[in-house]
Image: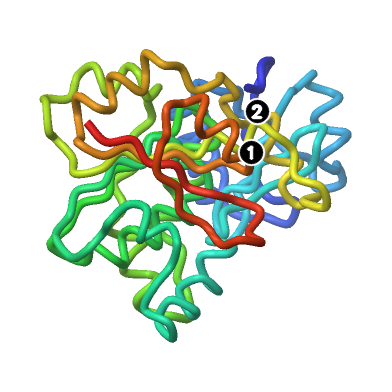
Amino acid sequence: MLTGKIGVTTARNATGSAAAAQARAWAEQLGALYVERPHNMGVDELMAQHDLAALVVGEKDGPRIHSAAGSFAYHPGMAVLRLQQLKRSATEHLLTALDLRPGKRVLDATLGLAADAAISSYAVGEDGTVVGLEASPLLYFAVSYGLKNYVAEDADLTAALRRIQPVQALAEDYLTQCAPDSFDVVYFDPMFRHPVNGAKGMEALRPLSYEEALSAETLQLALRVAPRVVIKERSEYILREYGCEEFIGGKYSRIKYGIIKR
């Protein structure tokens, strides 16, 4: 996870006091440095001048986070295409693994960009619950803003995003505080710590992510909170090491879901 000084500033062409006020409010929320931006100064120069590890820029559509690895602004990504496919086929490996239907309670313990949480939220509907945990303060900041404000072309996706309840917390800390059987299923996607060949668009996120490995202790906490735990990985071998005995995924799929039941 990224360490070092974080700054917040306005967009290069921002005018008026509203943009500066928003940037100051974001800086206070993040415990970051508010940086006044000369109109002729680019992001890289501003970061170098203030020795920043990351810079949050208040753009028209929301915050964009810049770091040495690149820049990132919230977008639901593959959730758009996945929801289109789900509406046509009425099934997806994720939903099969999670055993979801309307009204179910899901804890996504590794929220990330909330693509999986969005599909889960659509599946459980208005009567269900999807809580998403994100340990990285910067990633939580950007994604929680997107969940509240992003408007997709598909109204069902927008509604699914709005229903997700993001929480900034470490999974083990949150699980410790939960009562037994608070959820029907707990979901982990620890894959983000392993780079995917060709996924250059994700590299800007890597310094922002929380990269601790999923521990046996955390899995035991999850099994106290829900009778079903699902883990997403690229290797069935890794899933077996976690204790999974049931697997969901296509024969040629790059990912598989492992299931542990209480």
Q: Is residue 61 left or right of residue 106?
A: right
Q: Residue at x 26, y 59 (%)?
A: 100
Whether the residues at callouts 2 and 1 have beta carbons within 8 Å, the answer is yes
Q: CA distance from mark 2 to mark 1?
A: 6 Å
Q: Is residue 126 left or right of residue 209?
A: left
Q: Residue at x 62, y 34 (%)?
A: 8
Q: Using the rendered view, name the quadrant where residue 172 is placed.
A: top left
Residue 205 is tagged as none
Residue 224 horizontal/vertical position (percent): 19, 24
Query: What type is the residue that disc 2 sits on?
Result: Gly
Residue 7 is tagged as 2
Q: Going from the N terminus, do you reach mark 2 or mark 1 first?
A: 2
Residue 143 horizontal/vertical position (percent): 48, 47
Residue that mark 1 sits on: 56
Which quarter shows the N terminus?
A: top right
Residue 249 horizontal/vertical position (percent): 52, 57
